[in-house]
Image: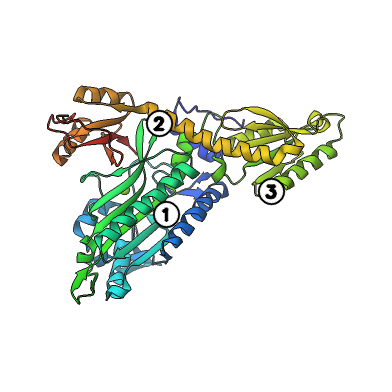
Amino acid sequence: GLGLTNTKDGNFGEWYSEVVTNGEMIEYYEISGCYILRPWTMAIWEIMQNFFDPEIKKMNIKTCYFPLFVSNNVLQKEKDHIEGFAPEVAWVTRSGDSDLEVPIAIRPTSETVMYPYYSKWIRGHRDLPLKLNQWCNVVRWEFSNPTPFIRSREFLWQEGHTAFATKEEADTEVLEILELYRRLYEEYLAVPVVKGKKSELEKFAGGLYTTSVEAFIPNTGRGVQGATSHCLGQNFAKMFEINFEDEKGEKTMVWQNSWAYSTRTIGVMVMVHGDDKGLVLPPKVSAVQVIVIHVPYKDADVKEIINACSATVKTLCDLGIRAEADLRENYSPGWKYSHWEMKGVPLRIEIGPKDLANNQVRAVRRDNGEKVDIPMADLVDKVKGMLDNIQQSMFDVAKQKRDACIQVTRTWDEFVEALGQKKLILAPWCDEEEVEKEVKAKTKGEIGAAKTLCSPFDQPELPEGTLCFASGKPAKKWTYWGRSY
Ligand SMILES: O=C(C[C@H]1NCCC[C@H]1O)Cn1cnc2c(c1=O)CCCC2
Ligand SMILES: [Mg+2]
């Protein structure tokens, strides 16, 4: 049958897998950890790209494309950048039936691919700022449980790599990009995120500091890193000798940033909004925003009803709404309702004989099931209004659910209890790496250890004398903790 066999609260992992498959977003592929991204997914990816790319173009960031392959010696250039990740690097060792002289790595990220050429291209201060972005795939041979969109061995992303003469310029751009990531999540995917700074332990080892937008999945009580914007400082400039002659003729190293969001964003959206009938898509990112379905009646003139449906679609499309009609004769209205609910189409319009007689249509919201009759005359305004309302309501509901999971804890016992209750924990922390490592060690278990997610830029009041929940030392900052993907 059409329905899901798992419920979101019953078996989240199985539910998620069914929803992305039955919703025709993903097809499982014969190689583990790899997934086919079907048009229903790529339409979302393209809508997001059509927001993000023009925004970074306004910042004079240009599109480039570097090769997929990385030579071994250049990949090994940065020891602490790569050592922790080495097992994840996939290698090409043969072509045809002959071995390659030297194995070639497939890019897991492109710092080491790009920066030797940044070194070549950047000579004087007039060559700065150099700001490039590429839309590509990367490969990381992950071993922990693969999850469509969230953790796959190949994924699509954009990776921005910028170089500046001063740290101030780099610091400014890090936050400009982070704001774009917040907008992607909150304004397009209707997913609330927290902007903050990663701890020294969780940051990108090759960088100076990492900022991120952090999402949260109430059902599993796990945080998920939504996107990252790193200031690399001069670390890579030192390694790859990327320097320039400043105005005074002094040789100076550049200050760099790198930032990315990936197809993981789509998985987060599905996890947050999906329900037991399938996907629930925010109107702004749905390939089809309105599906029009005719309700034939035994003796009614079905042709007239079908014409009304086609006319409705045309009216809506002419005003920029992504509307389609499902006029297939070989499926019942009920079957179609379930099908398009599974695909998460935000608004359904039904037109039957009585609707026609009353010169109205029946509109049904996917997010809360609300039904409303709309006079034909008001069709476009009402539908536009409903779509905007659905977008806002989906964000508000998700934010309310996420906020309900936030638990402030001040002691170890409170922390452990909140962790067991799948909470997103906000705790005062002494900001010592050893303490963070200890928390990880003490909460290690089947379902993973607790870690810091980020220290929110928006810090609550930290009264003098507040102590760290874990060490009892003077707390320095409020930090979000939790298990994560
Ligand atoms: O990729 C980054 C940092 C940076 N890369 C560019 C875009 C922004 C940001 O993700 C961190 N990172 C994660 N994962 C891996 C690597 C790695 O550098 C290197 C090797 C294999 C796996
Ligand atoms: Mg990783």
Q: Hey, what amino acid is under mark 3?
A: Cys
Q: Hey, what amino acid is under mark 2?
A: Arg
Q: Is mark 1 within 8 Å of ligand 1?
A: yes
Image point (45%, 42%), residue name: 186
Residue 295: image location, x then y, percent: 76, 32
Q: Quadrant of residue 304?
A: top right
The answer to which of marks 2 and 1 sits earlier in the sequence is: 1
Residue 434: image location, x then y, percent: 14, 39
Q: Which residue is mark 3?
A: 317
Q: Is mark 2 within 8 Å of ligand 2?
A: no
Question: In 3D space, how far apart are the residues under numbered discs 3 and 2 (Cα atoms)?
Answer: 35 Å
Q: Quadrant of residue 478?
A: top left
The crowding category of the residue bearing disc 2, from other C-alpha atoms within 10 Å (few below 14, some 14 to 19, many at least 20), is many
Most foreground residue, 285 or 38 = 285
Q: Which residue is mark 1?
A: 157
The answer to which of marks 1 and 3 sits earlier in the sequence is: 1
The crowding category of the residue bearing disc 3, from other C-alpha atoms within 10 Å (few below 14, some 14 to 19, many at least 20), is some
Image point (31%, 39%), residue name: 458
Assign a secondary structure to mark 2.
helix
Residue 208: image location, x then y, percent: 22, 54
Q: Is residue 274 left or right of residue 122?
A: right
Question: In 3D space, how far apart are the residues under numbered discs 2 and 1 (Cα atoms)?
Answer: 26 Å
Residue 218: image location, x then y, percent: 40, 30
Decide: marks 3, 2 in contact (CB < 8 A)? no
Compared to residue 471, the image places residue 96 above or below, namely below
Q: Which residue is mark 2?
A: 402
